[in-house]
Image (cartoon, coloured by chain):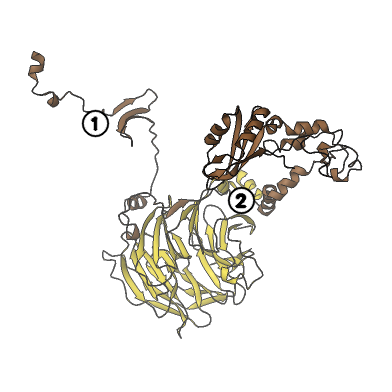
Protein backbone atom coordinates (compact mmCIF):
# COMPACT_ATOMS: atom_id res chain seq x y z
CA UNK A 1 0.00 0.00 0.00
CA UNK A 2 1.10 3.49 -0.75
CA UNK A 3 0.49 5.90 2.10
CA UNK A 4 -0.68 9.44 1.43
CA UNK A 5 1.39 11.96 3.36
CA UNK A 6 -0.44 14.99 4.62
CA UNK A 7 1.87 17.78 5.71
CA UNK A 8 -0.53 20.50 6.76
CA UNK A 9 0.77 20.82 10.28
CA UNK A 10 3.95 22.37 11.50
CA UNK A 11 4.04 20.61 14.83
CA UNK A 12 3.31 17.22 16.26
CA UNK A 13 -0.12 15.74 15.71
CA UNK A 14 -2.50 15.29 18.63
CA UNK A 15 -5.55 13.62 17.21
CA UNK A 16 -6.97 12.43 13.93
CA UNK A 17 -10.62 11.58 13.32
CA UNK A 18 -12.47 10.19 10.36
CA UNK A 19 -16.06 11.29 10.08
CA UNK A 20 -18.75 8.62 10.22
CA UNK A 21 -18.94 8.24 6.44
CA UNK A 22 -15.20 8.04 6.22
CA UNK A 23 -14.80 10.58 3.44
CA UNK A 24 -13.24 13.27 5.60
CA UNK A 25 -10.32 13.29 8.00
CA UNK A 26 -9.86 15.92 10.66
CA UNK A 27 -6.48 16.43 12.21
CA UNK A 28 -5.30 18.65 15.04
CA UNK A 29 -1.78 19.37 16.15
CA UNK A 30 0.17 21.54 18.51
CA UNK A 31 -0.01 24.36 15.97
CA UNK A 32 -3.23 26.30 16.19
CA UNK A 33 -5.10 25.10 13.14
CA UNK A 34 -7.47 22.26 12.44
CA UNK A 35 -7.21 20.64 9.02
CA UNK A 36 -9.93 18.83 7.11
CA UNK A 37 -8.84 16.40 4.39
CA UNK A 38 -10.52 14.19 1.86
CA UNK A 39 -9.56 10.69 2.87
CA UNK A 40 -9.63 9.30 -0.68
CA UNK A 41 -6.90 11.45 -2.19
CA UNK A 42 -5.46 13.49 0.66
CA UNK A 43 -6.69 16.79 -0.70
CA UNK A 44 -7.10 19.42 1.97
CA UNK A 45 -10.65 20.69 2.15
CA UNK A 46 -9.85 23.54 4.45
CA UNK A 47 -8.63 24.73 7.79
CA UNK A 48 -10.40 26.03 10.86
CA UNK A 49 -8.54 28.91 12.42
CA UNK A 50 -9.29 30.68 15.66
CA UNK A 51 -7.66 28.75 18.47
CA UNK A 52 -4.96 30.51 20.44
CA UNK A 53 -3.07 27.46 21.66
CA UNK A 54 -2.19 23.89 20.93
CA UNK A 55 -5.24 21.86 20.00
CA UNK A 56 -5.42 18.62 21.92
CA UNK A 57 -8.50 17.01 20.57
CA UNK A 58 -11.06 16.98 17.79
CA UNK A 59 -14.33 15.23 17.12
CA UNK A 60 -16.90 15.52 14.38
CA UNK A 61 -20.62 15.09 14.86
CA UNK A 62 -22.11 11.91 13.35
CA UNK A 63 -23.88 13.93 10.66
CA UNK A 64 -20.68 15.84 9.77
CA UNK A 65 -22.27 19.22 10.38
CA UNK A 66 -20.39 20.30 13.48
CA UNK A 67 -16.81 19.89 14.51
CA UNK A 68 -15.67 20.24 18.10
CA UNK A 69 -12.12 20.97 19.18
CA UNK A 70 -10.54 21.30 22.58
CA UNK A 71 -7.43 23.34 23.07
CA UNK A 72 -4.78 24.48 25.48
CA UNK A 73 -6.27 27.99 25.26
CA UNK A 74 -8.95 26.70 27.69
CA UNK A 75 -11.74 26.67 25.16
CA UNK A 76 -13.91 24.19 23.34
CA UNK A 77 -14.86 25.50 19.93
CA UNK A 78 -17.64 24.35 17.73
CA UNK A 79 -17.17 24.78 13.99
CA UNK A 80 -19.36 24.61 10.95
CA UNK A 81 -17.70 21.76 9.08
CA UNK A 82 -18.76 23.02 5.66
CA UNK A 83 -17.71 26.65 5.91
CA UNK A 84 -14.94 26.57 8.49
CA UNK A 85 -16.63 29.20 10.66
CA UNK A 86 -16.48 29.04 14.42
CA UNK A 87 -20.05 28.92 15.67
CA UNK A 88 -19.54 28.62 19.42
CA UNK A 89 -16.82 29.03 22.03
CA UNK A 90 -17.06 27.60 25.52
CA UNK A 91 -14.53 28.82 28.05
CA UNK A 92 -13.13 26.54 30.69
CA UNK A 93 -10.78 27.27 33.57
CA UNK A 94 -8.13 24.87 32.23
CA UNK A 95 -7.04 23.20 29.01
CA UNK A 96 -9.36 20.74 27.29
CA UNK A 97 -7.79 17.38 26.59
CA UNK A 98 -10.58 15.40 24.98
CA UNK A 99 -13.93 16.05 23.33
CA UNK A 100 -16.37 13.48 22.01
CA UNK A 101 -19.89 13.52 20.63
CA UNK A 102 -22.50 11.01 21.70
CA UNK A 103 -23.40 8.46 19.02
CA UNK A 104 -26.50 10.51 18.20
CA UNK A 105 -24.58 13.78 18.29
CA UNK A 106 -26.88 15.46 20.77
CA UNK A 107 -24.28 15.87 23.48
CA UNK A 108 -20.61 16.57 23.67
CA UNK A 109 -18.26 15.74 26.49
CA UNK A 110 -15.15 17.73 27.26
CA UNK A 111 -12.38 16.54 29.55
CA UNK A 112 -10.62 19.40 31.29
CA UNK A 113 -7.15 19.36 32.74
CA UNK A 114 -6.34 19.50 36.45
CA UNK A 115 -4.30 22.62 36.92
CA UNK A 116 -4.01 25.83 38.90
CA UNK A 117 -6.16 24.56 41.76
CA UNK A 118 -8.88 23.29 39.49
CA UNK A 119 -9.71 19.62 39.57
CA UNK A 120 -10.03 17.65 36.38
CA UNK A 121 -13.60 17.54 35.17
CA UNK A 122 -15.72 15.99 32.47
CA UNK A 123 -18.27 18.51 31.24
CA UNK A 124 -21.21 17.56 29.06
CA UNK A 125 -22.56 20.15 26.65
CA UNK A 126 -25.86 19.94 24.83
CA UNK A 127 -25.60 20.41 21.10
CA UNK A 128 -28.39 21.74 18.90
CA UNK A 129 -28.53 21.38 15.11
CA UNK A 130 -31.02 24.12 14.32
CA UNK A 131 -31.07 26.54 11.42
CA UNK A 132 -28.76 28.76 13.39
CA UNK A 133 -25.84 26.67 14.55
CA UNK A 134 -24.59 29.47 16.77
CA UNK A 135 -27.50 29.08 19.19
CA UNK A 136 -26.04 26.60 21.64
CA UNK A 137 -26.46 26.27 25.38
CA UNK A 138 -23.86 28.31 27.24
CA UNK A 139 -23.52 26.15 30.32
CA UNK A 140 -22.70 22.46 30.55
CA UNK A 141 -25.68 20.31 31.37
CA UNK A 142 -23.57 17.99 33.48
CA UNK A 143 -20.24 18.27 35.20
CA UNK A 144 -18.34 15.32 36.63
CA UNK A 145 -15.41 16.14 38.87
CA UNK A 146 -12.60 13.64 39.13
CA UNK A 147 -11.42 13.97 42.71
CA UNK A 148 -8.94 11.13 42.85
CA UNK A 149 -7.07 11.14 39.59
CA UNK A 150 -7.78 13.41 36.68
CA UNK A 151 -9.34 11.97 33.55
CA UNK A 152 -7.12 12.07 30.50
CA UNK A 153 -9.49 10.56 27.98
CA UNK A 154 -13.19 9.83 27.87
CA UNK A 155 -15.86 8.62 25.52
CA UNK A 156 -19.48 7.62 25.22
CA UNK A 157 -20.55 4.01 25.30
CA UNK A 158 -23.43 2.60 23.26
CA UNK A 159 -26.39 4.99 23.03
CA UNK A 160 -24.63 7.45 25.28
CA UNK A 161 -25.53 5.35 28.28
CA UNK A 162 -22.19 5.54 30.05
CA UNK A 163 -19.28 7.85 29.99
CA UNK A 164 -16.09 5.82 30.08
CA UNK A 165 -13.03 7.70 31.27
CA UNK A 166 -9.39 6.75 31.38
CA UNK A 167 -7.36 8.29 34.18
CA UNK A 168 -3.88 9.49 34.80
CA UNK A 169 -3.28 6.75 37.37
CA UNK A 170 -4.05 3.99 34.86
CA UNK A 171 -7.57 3.29 36.01
CA UNK A 172 -10.73 3.26 33.92
CA UNK A 173 -14.03 4.41 35.31
CA UNK A 174 -17.59 4.25 34.19
CA UNK A 175 -20.05 7.08 34.83
CA UNK A 176 -23.74 7.21 34.18
CA UNK A 177 -24.29 9.25 31.04
CA UNK A 178 -27.35 11.04 32.45
CA UNK A 179 -26.56 11.64 36.10
CA UNK A 180 -22.79 11.61 36.08
CA UNK A 181 -22.66 9.19 38.97
CA UNK A 182 -19.59 6.98 39.09
CA UNK A 183 -20.65 3.38 38.68
CA UNK A 184 -17.36 1.57 38.51
CA UNK A 185 -13.62 2.08 38.64
CA UNK A 186 -11.12 -0.53 37.53
CA UNK A 187 -7.36 -0.35 37.76
CA UNK A 188 -6.94 -1.61 34.23
CA UNK A 189 -3.36 -0.58 33.64
CA UNK A 190 -0.34 -0.42 35.86
CA UNK A 191 -0.64 2.14 38.62
CA UNK A 192 0.52 5.64 37.70
CA UNK A 193 0.80 4.84 34.02
CA UNK A 194 -1.41 7.29 32.26
CA UNK A 195 -4.02 6.14 29.77
CA UNK A 196 -3.32 8.00 26.56
CA UNK A 197 -6.14 6.92 24.34
CA UNK A 198 -9.54 5.29 24.50
CA UNK A 199 -11.40 4.36 21.34
CA UNK A 200 -14.63 2.47 20.93
CA UNK A 201 -15.62 -0.30 18.60
CA UNK A 202 -18.23 0.48 15.94
CA UNK A 203 -21.14 -0.62 18.11
CA UNK A 204 -19.58 1.01 21.19
CA UNK A 205 -20.07 -2.04 23.40
CA UNK A 206 -16.36 -2.40 24.00
CA UNK A 207 -13.35 -0.17 23.74
CA UNK A 208 -9.57 -0.24 23.68
CA UNK A 209 -7.26 1.70 25.92
CA UNK A 210 -3.65 2.57 25.22
CA UNK A 211 -1.39 3.26 28.12
CA UNK A 212 2.08 4.37 28.95
CA UNK A 213 2.63 0.96 30.59
CA UNK A 214 3.30 -0.50 27.10
CA UNK A 215 0.04 -2.34 26.83
CA UNK A 216 -3.39 -1.89 25.34
CA UNK A 217 -6.52 -3.48 26.75
CA UNK A 218 -9.80 -4.36 25.22
CA UNK A 219 -12.55 -3.74 27.75
CA UNK A 220 -16.26 -4.16 27.90
CA UNK A 221 -18.20 -0.91 28.21
CA UNK A 222 -20.95 -2.55 30.23
CA UNK A 223 -18.96 -3.79 33.21
CA UNK A 224 -15.36 -2.76 32.48
CA UNK A 225 -14.20 -6.36 32.23
CA UNK A 226 -10.80 -6.70 30.61
CA UNK A 227 -11.40 -8.86 27.54
CA UNK A 228 -7.99 -8.85 25.89
CA UNK A 229 -4.52 -7.50 26.54
CA UNK A 230 -2.06 -6.53 23.84
CA UNK A 231 1.49 -6.19 25.03
CA UNK A 232 3.92 -3.97 23.16
CA UNK A 233 7.56 -3.09 23.76
CA UNK A 234 7.08 0.65 23.85
CA UNK A 235 4.78 3.15 25.56
CA UNK A 236 1.55 3.43 23.64
CA UNK A 237 -0.08 6.68 22.69
CA UNK A 238 -3.02 5.47 20.71
CA UNK A 239 -5.03 2.39 19.87
CA UNK A 240 -7.93 1.73 17.58
CA UNK A 241 -10.18 -1.21 16.71
CA UNK A 242 -10.55 -1.99 13.04
CA UNK A 243 -13.98 -2.82 11.68
CA UNK A 244 -14.30 -5.47 8.97
CA UNK A 245 -11.20 -7.34 10.11
CA UNK A 246 -10.59 -8.37 13.69
CA UNK A 247 -7.46 -6.38 14.27
CA UNK A 248 -6.39 -3.58 16.53
CA UNK A 249 -3.83 -0.96 15.59
CA UNK A 250 -1.54 0.41 18.26
CA UNK A 251 0.60 3.47 17.90
CA UNK A 252 3.39 4.59 20.14
CA UNK A 253 7.11 4.90 20.43
CA UNK A 254 9.71 6.09 22.83
CA UNK A 255 9.22 9.83 23.19
CA UNK A 256 12.29 11.76 22.16
CA UNK A 257 12.44 13.47 25.54
CA UNK A 258 12.57 10.13 27.33
CA UNK A 259 15.22 8.49 25.17
CA UNK A 260 18.07 9.54 27.40
CA UNK A 261 16.26 8.62 30.59
CA UNK A 262 15.29 5.12 29.56
CA UNK A 263 17.24 2.14 28.45
CA UNK A 264 15.19 1.80 25.29
CA UNK A 265 16.81 3.12 22.17
CA UNK A 266 15.06 5.65 20.05
CA UNK A 267 12.89 4.18 17.38
CA UNK A 268 10.05 1.70 17.15
CA UNK A 269 7.99 4.36 15.44
CA UNK A 270 5.71 1.88 13.83
CA UNK A 271 2.02 1.17 13.81
CA UNK A 272 1.57 -2.28 15.28
CA UNK A 273 -1.20 -4.55 14.14
CA UNK A 274 -2.47 -7.15 16.57
CA UNK A 275 -5.13 -9.71 16.04
CA UNK A 276 -8.05 -8.64 18.17
CA UNK A 277 -9.01 -12.12 19.31
CA UNK A 278 -5.72 -13.99 19.39
CA UNK A 279 -3.70 -11.09 20.79
CA UNK A 280 -0.77 -11.88 18.47
CA UNK A 281 1.18 -9.17 16.78
CA UNK A 282 0.68 -9.77 13.07
CA UNK A 283 2.59 -6.95 11.45
CA UNK A 284 3.95 -3.47 11.58
CA UNK A 285 3.80 -0.47 9.32
CA UNK A 286 6.70 1.91 9.50
CA UNK A 287 7.06 5.36 8.07
CA UNK A 288 6.97 7.94 10.85
CA UNK A 289 10.10 9.66 12.11
CA UNK A 290 8.74 10.09 15.58
CA UNK A 291 6.37 8.40 17.99
CA UNK A 292 2.86 7.91 16.73
CA UNK A 293 0.58 10.16 18.72
CA UNK A 294 -2.69 9.09 17.21
CA UNK A 295 -4.17 6.42 15.00
CA UNK A 296 -7.72 6.24 13.76
CA UNK A 297 -9.33 3.82 11.40
CA UNK A 298 -11.81 4.44 8.59
CA UNK A 299 -15.31 3.47 9.78
CA UNK A 300 -15.53 0.92 6.96
CA UNK A 301 -12.19 -0.56 7.92
CA UNK A 302 -10.62 0.13 4.53
CA UNK A 303 -8.01 2.65 5.61
CA UNK A 304 -6.32 4.07 8.63
CA UNK A 305 -4.57 7.30 9.40
CA UNK A 306 -1.71 7.86 11.80
CA UNK A 307 -0.31 11.11 13.08
CA UNK A 308 3.12 11.38 14.56
CA UNK A 309 5.38 13.58 16.55
CA UNK A 310 7.04 14.37 13.22
CA UNK A 311 4.03 16.47 12.15
CA UNK A 312 2.92 14.19 9.34
CA UNK A 313 -0.37 12.46 8.86
CA UNK A 314 -0.08 9.24 6.91
CA UNK A 315 -3.23 7.81 5.39
CA UNK A 316 -2.97 4.16 4.44
CA UNK A 317 -5.56 2.49 2.28
CA UNK A 318 -5.32 -1.22 2.93
CA UNK A 319 -4.57 -3.54 0.05
CA UNK A 320 -5.65 -7.07 -0.59
CA UNK A 321 -3.18 -8.89 1.66
CA UNK A 322 -4.62 -7.06 4.64
CA UNK A 323 -8.10 -8.39 3.98
CA UNK A 324 -6.93 -11.85 2.95
CA UNK A 325 -5.04 -12.68 6.09
CA UNK A 326 -6.76 -15.27 8.20
CA UNK A 327 -5.81 -17.68 10.92
CA UNK A 328 -6.12 -21.34 10.15
CA UNK A 329 -9.08 -21.69 12.51
CA UNK A 330 -10.81 -18.76 10.88
CA UNK A 331 -10.34 -20.32 7.49
CA UNK A 332 -11.75 -23.61 8.68
CA UNK A 333 -14.77 -21.88 10.06
CA UNK A 334 -15.26 -20.15 6.73
CA UNK A 335 -15.31 -23.49 4.95
CA UNK A 336 -18.00 -24.88 7.17
CA UNK B 1 -8.51 39.29 -64.36
CA UNK B 2 -12.26 39.44 -63.96
CA UNK B 3 -11.98 36.95 -61.14
CA UNK B 4 -9.57 39.13 -59.35
CA UNK B 5 -11.72 42.12 -59.97
CA UNK B 6 -14.49 40.62 -57.94
CA UNK B 7 -12.40 40.82 -54.86
CA UNK B 8 -12.04 44.17 -53.21
CA UNK B 9 -8.76 43.30 -51.61
CA UNK B 10 -6.96 39.98 -51.27
CA UNK B 11 -6.42 40.66 -47.61
CA UNK B 12 -10.16 40.57 -47.06
CA UNK B 13 -10.47 37.18 -48.61
CA UNK B 14 -12.22 35.07 -46.12
CA UNK B 15 -11.14 31.83 -47.65
CA UNK B 16 -7.55 32.76 -47.19
CA UNK B 17 -6.03 30.56 -44.49
CA UNK B 18 -5.07 32.45 -41.44
CA UNK B 19 -1.80 30.83 -40.28
CA UNK B 20 -2.79 31.23 -36.67
CA UNK B 21 -6.09 29.43 -37.11
CA UNK B 22 -6.30 25.84 -35.99
CA UNK B 23 -8.32 23.18 -37.77
CA UNK B 24 -11.44 22.12 -35.98
CA UNK B 25 -11.36 19.12 -33.69
CA UNK B 26 -12.43 15.87 -35.31
CA UNK B 27 -14.10 13.08 -33.43
CA UNK B 28 -14.57 9.70 -35.01
CA UNK B 29 -16.17 6.70 -33.39
CA UNK B 30 -14.34 3.47 -33.96
CA UNK B 31 -15.84 0.04 -34.40
CA UNK B 32 -14.72 -1.20 -31.01
CA UNK B 33 -16.60 1.56 -29.24
CA UNK B 34 -13.60 3.81 -28.68
CA UNK B 35 -13.44 7.36 -29.89
CA UNK B 36 -10.56 8.98 -31.70
CA UNK B 37 -10.24 12.69 -31.09
CA UNK B 38 -7.89 14.63 -33.33
CA UNK B 39 -7.23 18.16 -32.16
CA UNK B 40 -4.64 20.77 -33.00
CA UNK B 41 -2.75 23.13 -30.78
CA UNK B 42 0.40 25.21 -30.72
CA UNK B 43 3.26 23.94 -28.67
CA UNK B 44 5.72 26.07 -26.74
CA UNK B 45 7.82 26.73 -29.83
CA UNK B 46 4.79 28.11 -31.63
CA UNK B 47 4.55 25.09 -33.90
CA UNK B 48 1.31 23.53 -34.82
CA UNK B 49 0.90 20.11 -33.25
CA UNK B 50 -1.66 17.49 -33.99
CA UNK B 51 -2.83 15.59 -30.96
CA UNK B 52 -4.55 12.27 -31.49
CA UNK B 53 -6.26 10.74 -28.53
CA UNK B 54 -8.09 7.48 -28.39
CA UNK B 55 -10.65 7.46 -25.68
CA UNK B 56 -12.37 4.45 -24.31
CA UNK B 57 -15.33 5.23 -22.14
CA UNK B 58 -16.11 2.81 -19.38
CA UNK B 59 -19.14 3.39 -17.25
CA UNK B 60 -18.48 2.50 -13.65
CA UNK B 61 -21.56 2.54 -11.55
CA UNK B 62 -20.87 3.44 -7.96
CA UNK B 63 -23.27 3.84 -5.11
CA UNK B 64 -22.40 6.87 -3.09
CA UNK B 65 -23.94 8.01 0.10
CA UNK B 66 -25.94 11.14 -0.89
CA UNK B 67 -24.44 13.05 2.01
CA UNK B 68 -20.97 12.18 0.83
CA UNK B 69 -21.85 13.17 -2.72
CA UNK B 70 -23.20 16.47 -1.43
CA UNK B 71 -20.00 17.08 0.48
CA UNK B 72 -17.89 16.48 -2.62
CA UNK B 73 -19.26 19.75 -3.98
CA UNK B 74 -18.14 21.78 -1.00
CA UNK B 75 -15.75 24.57 -1.78
CA UNK B 76 -12.49 24.97 0.02
CA UNK B 77 -12.12 27.33 2.97
CA UNK B 78 -9.58 28.57 5.47
CA UNK B 79 -6.01 28.40 4.24
CA UNK B 80 -7.16 26.44 1.20
CA UNK B 81 -9.65 29.11 0.14
CA UNK B 82 -9.50 29.79 -3.58
CA UNK B 83 -7.16 26.94 -4.32
CA UNK B 84 -7.83 24.83 -7.37
CA UNK B 85 -9.56 21.51 -6.88
CA UNK B 86 -7.29 18.53 -6.48
CA UNK B 87 -4.57 17.86 -3.96
CA UNK B 88 -2.00 20.60 -3.65
CA UNK B 89 1.64 19.62 -3.79
CA UNK B 90 2.70 21.49 -0.67
CA UNK B 91 0.35 19.62 1.63
CA UNK B 92 -0.20 16.25 0.02
CA UNK B 93 2.28 13.76 -1.33
CA UNK B 94 2.43 10.04 -1.86
CA UNK B 95 4.84 8.03 0.22
CA UNK B 96 6.91 5.02 -0.60
CA UNK B 97 5.13 1.80 -1.15
CA UNK B 98 4.88 -0.27 2.00
CA UNK B 99 4.55 -4.00 1.75
CA UNK B 100 2.20 -4.95 4.52
CA UNK B 101 1.48 -8.64 4.80
CA UNK B 102 -0.01 -9.67 8.09
CA UNK B 103 1.21 -13.02 9.31
CA UNK B 104 1.36 -14.83 12.59
CA UNK B 105 5.12 -15.17 12.62
CA UNK B 106 5.92 -11.82 11.04
CA UNK B 107 8.79 -11.28 13.43
CA UNK B 108 10.66 -14.29 12.10
CA UNK B 109 9.99 -13.23 8.54
CA UNK B 110 11.10 -9.68 9.17
CA UNK B 111 14.32 -10.91 10.73
CA UNK B 112 14.99 -13.16 7.75
CA UNK B 113 14.32 -10.39 5.28
CA UNK B 114 16.70 -8.12 7.07
CA UNK B 115 19.33 -10.82 6.92
CA UNK B 116 18.89 -11.37 3.22
CA UNK B 117 18.59 -7.72 2.33
CA UNK B 118 21.46 -6.60 4.53
CA UNK B 119 24.74 -5.86 2.83
CA UNK B 120 26.79 -7.94 5.20
CA UNK B 121 24.68 -11.02 4.80
CA UNK B 122 24.71 -10.70 1.03
CA UNK B 123 28.49 -10.48 0.86
CA UNK B 124 28.88 -13.41 3.13
CA UNK B 125 26.56 -15.47 1.02
CA UNK B 126 28.52 -14.58 -2.09
CA UNK B 127 31.76 -15.67 -0.59
CA UNK B 128 30.42 -18.75 1.10
CA UNK B 129 31.40 -21.15 -1.69
CA UNK B 130 34.64 -19.38 -2.58
CA UNK B 131 37.81 -21.35 -2.02
CA UNK B 132 41.17 -19.88 -1.32
CA UNK B 133 43.52 -20.47 -4.25
CA UNK B 134 47.20 -19.62 -4.41
CA UNK B 135 48.20 -17.68 -7.50
CA UNK B 136 51.64 -19.28 -7.55
CA UNK B 137 51.01 -22.98 -7.07
CA UNK B 138 47.19 -23.11 -7.17
CA UNK B 139 47.23 -24.67 -3.74
CA UNK B 140 44.53 -24.07 -1.17
CA UNK B 141 46.26 -21.28 0.69
CA UNK B 142 46.79 -17.53 0.31
CA UNK B 143 49.45 -16.48 -2.16
CA UNK B 144 51.39 -14.74 0.58
CA UNK B 145 51.66 -18.03 2.46
CA UNK B 146 52.85 -20.03 -0.50
CA UNK B 147 56.00 -22.04 0.24
CA UNK B 148 57.19 -21.40 -3.36
CA UNK B 149 56.63 -17.66 -3.06
CA UNK B 150 60.28 -16.74 -3.54
CA UNK B 151 61.20 -19.35 -6.04
CA UNK B 152 58.30 -19.54 -8.47
CA UNK B 153 56.42 -17.09 -10.61
CA UNK B 154 52.64 -17.01 -10.68
CA UNK B 155 51.03 -19.65 -12.83
CA UNK B 156 48.71 -17.28 -14.60
CA UNK B 157 49.03 -13.54 -14.33
CA UNK B 158 46.32 -12.36 -16.70
CA UNK B 159 43.94 -11.45 -13.93
CA UNK B 160 46.37 -9.04 -12.34
CA UNK B 161 47.12 -6.97 -15.40
CA UNK B 162 43.59 -6.30 -16.56
CA UNK B 163 42.81 -3.69 -13.99
CA UNK B 164 45.80 -1.54 -14.72
CA UNK B 165 45.32 -1.15 -18.42
CA UNK B 166 44.55 2.32 -19.63
CA UNK B 167 46.77 4.14 -17.17
CA UNK B 168 48.82 6.98 -18.59
CA UNK B 169 52.11 6.07 -17.07
CA UNK B 170 51.90 2.40 -17.56
CA UNK B 171 54.94 0.48 -16.45
CA UNK B 172 56.21 -1.81 -19.14
CA UNK B 173 58.51 -4.76 -19.19
CA UNK B 174 62.10 -3.85 -19.58
CA UNK B 175 61.60 -0.28 -18.52
CA UNK B 176 63.00 -1.01 -15.18
CA UNK B 177 66.55 -2.16 -15.09
CA UNK B 178 67.27 -5.02 -12.82
CA UNK B 179 70.06 -3.04 -11.22
CA UNK B 180 68.13 0.07 -10.23
CA UNK B 181 66.19 -1.53 -7.47
CA UNK B 182 66.63 -4.52 -5.31
CA UNK B 183 62.94 -5.28 -5.41
CA UNK B 184 61.72 -6.94 -8.56
CA UNK B 185 57.99 -7.24 -8.95
CA UNK B 186 56.84 -10.84 -9.43
CA UNK B 187 55.78 -10.30 -13.01
CA UNK B 188 59.28 -9.14 -13.96
CA UNK B 189 61.06 -12.03 -12.39
CA UNK B 190 62.85 -14.61 -14.41
CA UNK B 191 60.55 -17.05 -16.09
CA UNK B 192 57.59 -14.69 -15.80
CA UNK B 193 58.49 -12.58 -18.78
CA UNK B 194 55.40 -13.61 -20.73
CA UNK B 195 53.12 -12.37 -17.99
CA UNK B 196 54.92 -9.10 -17.75
CA UNK B 197 54.76 -8.45 -21.45
CA UNK B 198 51.07 -9.04 -21.54
CA UNK B 199 50.50 -6.62 -18.75
CA UNK B 200 51.95 -3.68 -20.65
CA UNK B 201 49.46 -4.44 -23.38
CA UNK B 202 48.88 -2.23 -26.34
CA UNK B 203 50.35 0.87 -24.76
CA UNK B 204 53.84 -0.44 -24.74
CA UNK B 205 54.67 0.87 -28.19
CA UNK B 206 53.00 4.18 -27.45
CA UNK B 207 54.95 4.65 -24.30
CA UNK B 208 58.21 4.34 -26.10
CA UNK B 209 57.23 7.31 -28.24
CA UNK B 210 55.51 9.36 -25.56
CA UNK B 211 56.79 12.72 -24.46
CA UNK B 212 56.13 14.25 -21.13
CA UNK B 213 55.67 18.00 -21.41
CA UNK B 214 55.79 20.05 -18.26
CA UNK B 215 55.51 23.73 -17.43
CA UNK B 216 52.48 23.99 -19.67
CA UNK B 217 50.35 27.08 -19.28
CA UNK B 218 47.09 26.79 -17.43
CA UNK B 219 45.30 28.06 -20.48
CA UNK B 220 46.73 25.45 -22.82
CA UNK B 221 44.47 23.50 -25.13
CA UNK B 222 44.87 20.01 -26.50
CA UNK B 223 44.46 21.26 -30.05
CA UNK B 224 47.21 23.81 -29.63
CA UNK B 225 49.59 21.23 -28.28
CA UNK B 226 48.72 18.90 -31.10
CA UNK B 227 49.49 21.66 -33.62
CA UNK B 228 52.80 22.35 -31.93
CA UNK B 229 53.94 18.74 -32.02
CA UNK B 230 52.30 17.59 -35.22
CA UNK B 231 55.04 19.15 -37.33
CA UNK B 232 57.54 16.54 -36.13
CA UNK B 233 55.40 13.60 -37.12
CA UNK B 234 52.08 11.90 -36.62
CA UNK B 235 50.77 12.45 -33.12
CA UNK B 236 48.60 9.59 -31.97
CA UNK B 237 47.47 10.99 -28.68
CA UNK B 238 47.54 14.21 -26.72
CA UNK B 239 46.73 14.08 -23.08
CA UNK B 240 46.49 17.31 -21.19
CA UNK B 241 45.95 16.90 -17.47
CA UNK B 242 43.14 19.09 -16.27
CA UNK B 243 41.77 19.99 -12.91
CA UNK B 244 38.66 18.01 -12.27
CA UNK B 245 36.66 20.98 -11.03
CA UNK B 246 37.98 24.05 -12.78
CA UNK B 247 38.81 22.27 -16.05
CA UNK B 248 42.03 24.27 -16.23
CA UNK B 249 45.22 22.61 -17.36
CA UNK B 250 47.30 21.28 -14.51
CA UNK B 251 50.61 22.08 -16.11
CA UNK B 252 51.67 18.87 -17.74
CA UNK B 253 50.78 16.87 -20.79
CA UNK B 254 51.67 13.67 -22.60
CA UNK B 255 52.15 13.58 -26.33
CA UNK B 256 52.33 10.19 -28.04
CA UNK B 257 53.91 9.88 -31.45
CA UNK B 258 53.43 7.12 -33.94
CA UNK B 259 57.16 6.92 -34.49
CA UNK B 260 59.82 7.03 -31.82
CA UNK B 261 62.26 8.91 -34.08
CA UNK B 262 59.74 11.71 -34.50
CA UNK B 263 59.31 11.78 -30.77
CA UNK B 264 63.05 12.06 -30.27
CA UNK B 265 63.23 14.94 -32.72
CA UNK B 266 60.30 16.69 -31.07
CA UNK B 267 61.88 16.21 -27.68
CA UNK B 268 65.06 17.78 -28.93
CA UNK B 269 63.44 20.76 -30.59
CA UNK B 270 60.60 21.52 -28.25
CA UNK B 271 62.50 21.39 -25.00
CA UNK B 272 62.85 25.02 -23.98
CA UNK B 273 60.27 26.22 -26.45
CA UNK B 274 58.34 29.29 -25.36
CA UNK B 275 54.62 28.65 -25.29
CA UNK B 276 52.15 31.04 -23.75
CA UNK B 277 54.83 32.89 -21.81
CA UNK B 278 56.19 29.72 -20.32
CA UNK B 279 59.17 27.69 -21.34
CA UNK B 280 58.21 24.11 -22.03
CA UNK B 281 60.17 21.26 -20.67
CA UNK B 282 59.97 18.16 -22.81
CA UNK B 283 61.35 14.74 -22.02
CA UNK B 284 60.53 11.14 -22.68
CA UNK B 285 57.84 9.90 -20.39
CA UNK B 286 59.33 7.96 -17.55
CA UNK B 287 57.77 4.83 -16.40
CA UNK B 288 56.67 5.03 -12.87
CA UNK B 289 56.98 1.96 -10.83
How dense is the environment of label 2, judged by Cα within 10 Å: few (below 14), some, or many (20 and up)? many
Quarter of image, res B168: top right
- Asked if residue A301 shows in the view, the reply is no
Residue A150, image x, y percentages: 51, 78
Q: Is residue B287 left or right of residue A162?
A: right
| First in sequence: mark 1 vs mark 2 | 1
Chain shown yellow: that is A
Q: Please say if B54 is above or below A237.
A: above
- Write the residue at 43% across / 50% down: A40
In the picture, the disc for residue B20 is 1
Circles 1 and 2 on the same chain: yes
Q: Secondary structure at mark 2?
A: loop
Q: Name chain B's colour.
A: brown
Furthest residue toward top: B1
Mark 1 and mark 2 in contact? Answer it, CB < 8 Å.
Answer: no
Furthest residue toward bottom: A117
- Write the residue at 58% across / 32% down: B229
**Residue on which the image places disc 2:** B102
Mark 1 chain: B
Amino acid sequence: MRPILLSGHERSLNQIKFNRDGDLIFSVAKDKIVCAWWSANGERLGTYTGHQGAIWTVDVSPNTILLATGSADNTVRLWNVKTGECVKVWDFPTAVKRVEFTPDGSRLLAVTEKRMGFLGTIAVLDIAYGEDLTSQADEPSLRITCEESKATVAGWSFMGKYIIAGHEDGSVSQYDGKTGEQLENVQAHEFDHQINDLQFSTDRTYFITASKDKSAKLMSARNLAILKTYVADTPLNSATITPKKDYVILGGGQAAMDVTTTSARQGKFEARFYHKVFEDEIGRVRGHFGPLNTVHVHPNGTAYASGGEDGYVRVHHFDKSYFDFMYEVEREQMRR
Amino acid sequence: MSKLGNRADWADDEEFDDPSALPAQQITTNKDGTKTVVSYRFNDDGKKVRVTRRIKTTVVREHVNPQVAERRSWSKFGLEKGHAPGPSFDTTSVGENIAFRPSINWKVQAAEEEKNGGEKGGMKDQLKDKKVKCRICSGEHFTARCPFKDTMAPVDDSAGGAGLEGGDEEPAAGGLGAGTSSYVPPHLRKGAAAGGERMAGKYEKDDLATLRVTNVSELAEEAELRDLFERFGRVTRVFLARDRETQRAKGFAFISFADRDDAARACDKMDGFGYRHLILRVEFAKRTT
